[in-house]
Image (cartoon, grey):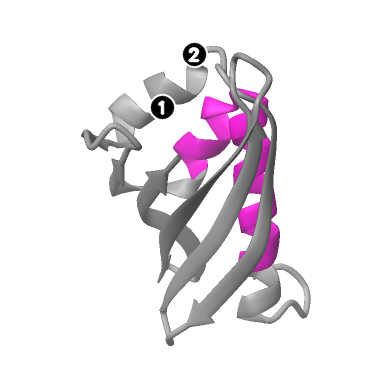
Amino acid sequence: MQGNQTDFERLMELNATYIDAIRHNDAGWFDDQLGEDFVCSNPDGSIVAKRAFLKQVEKPLTISELAAEDVKIRVLGDFAIVHARTRYRNAEGHLRRGRYTDVWARRDGRWVAIAAHVTR
């Protein structure tokens, strides 16, 4: 945790940075913030582990104006769940919405993402 941040505040910050890292194809941020056992369930139903997820992040986005809305964070000791809605424009420019759930664990005194589920 940084400074006097509460777990909730730190997770809010990590969530915002997570979305920003997606927008900017920042695989380096994810390499540092994801647990080695991270798995992601993609909108197409596929499940990828950390290394495959990092390769996905490096690819140019097919969406724009990605934003997280209605963020709800539940801190359960050394475990936290983030639920949120997304708003974005698809490749054709149409406004779309989706949802995501991220699972975080406190390991060695820091929060790392260990799972994600994304819908569009």
Q: Earlier in the sequence, mark 1 or mark 2?
A: 1
Q: Residue 92 location in percent, x, y? A: 62, 14
Q: Quadrant of the N terminus?
A: bottom right
Residue 67 lies in the magenta-colored region: no
Residue drawn at (50%, 66%), measured in percent from left and top?
A: 82
Nearer to us in this view, 33 or 103: 103
Q: Is residue 88 above or below residue 52?
A: below
Q: Are marks 1 and 2 in contact (CB under 8 Å)?
A: no
Q: Amino acid at mark 2?
A: Lys
| Side (left or right) of 34 relative to 97 | left
Residue drawn at (30%, 26%), measured in percent from left and top?
A: 52
| Side (left or right) of 18 relative to 30 | right
Q: Is residue 92 above or below residue 96?
A: above
Residue 24 lies in the magenta-colored region: yes
Q: Which mark is residue 54?
A: 1
Q: Quadrant of the C terminus?
A: top left
| Side (left or right) of 13 relative to 82 | right
**CA distance for labels 1 and 2:** 9 Å
Q: Amino acid at mark 1?
A: Leu
Nearer to us in this view, 14 or 66: 66
Q: Which circle, 1 or 2, is nearer the viewer?
A: 2
Q: Can you name the residue that lies furthest to the right here?
A: 3
Q: Can you name the residue that lies furthest to the bottom here?
A: 77
Q: Which mark is residue 59?
A: 2
SS assignment at label 1: helix
Q: Residues within 10 Å of mark 2 (few under 14, many from 20)?
A: few
Q: Residue 41 location in percent, x, y? A: 28, 43
Nearer to us in this view, 49 or 119: 119
Residue drawn at (59%, 15%), measured in percent from left and top?
A: 91
Q: Residues within 10 Å of mark 1 (few under 14, many from 20)?
A: some
Per the picture, the main secondary structure of the magenta-coloured stretch is helix
From which residue to which does the magenta span run?
Answer: 11-32
